[in-house]
Amino acid sequence: MPSENAELRKVGLKVTLPRVKIFNILERAKEHHLSAEDVYKKLLEHGDDVGLATVYRVLTQFEAAGLVLRHNFEGGHAVFEMAGDDHHDHMVCTQTGEVVEFVDEIIEERQQKIALEHGYEIVDHSLILYVKPLKSDKK
């Protein structure tokens, strides 16, 4: 718990049990993109008594403090992932909702070049590819 406490204090948030529990869930989740409902279900699975409204409030506070990133992928609901130094883009399957993270240096270089050609500098960006599985020829 000490590292979570330090992270919360570093961004100016008071260390509370709900914040620590939610931080831990986000940090340790196998799935990198969790909705507020996903976090709430994981809290319930661990027997933690934290309400859904508290989960939403804490996630919003974490986003404002720069601890998490909010993504509004197609499909309507927001998902959250821990903010990190490593930039990556996303592919979202339109059939299953699966989110795949990827990095492609050629795409990154091309985006920089396009911005420069138009007289701009990229300060931030988000690339989301909406994909579907390839149709199989097997019948």
Image (cartoon, rainbow, N blue to C red):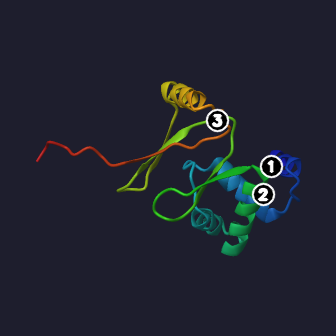
Rounded to the nearest whole Å, what is the CA distance between mark 3 and mark 1?
A: 32 Å
Q: Which mark is residue 122?
A: 3
Residue type, mark 1 in image:
Glu
Question: Could you classify mark 3 by the number of other residues whose Cα lies within 10 Å: few (under 14), some (14-19), or many (20 or more)?
Answer: few
Instruction: Kindly identify the residue that appears in the image at 65 percent across and 65 percent down.
Output: 43
Residue at label 2?
20
Rounded to the nearest whole Å, what is the CA distance between mark 2 and mark 1?
A: 6 Å
Residue 100 place in picture, x, y as percent: 47, 43
Mark 3 or mark 1: which is in front? 3
Q: Taking 109 as reference, is 51 left or right? A: right
Rounded to the nearest whole Å, what is the CA distance between mark 3 and mark 2?
A: 34 Å
Instruction: Kindly identify the residue that appears in the image at 87 percent across and 47 percent down.
Output: 10
The quarter of the displayed image where residue 54 is located = bottom right
Residue at label 1?
4
Q: Nearer the viewer, residue 104 or 44?
A: 104
Question: Could you classify mark 1 by the number of other residues whose Cα lies within 10 Å: few (under 14), some (14-19), or many (20 or more)?
Answer: some
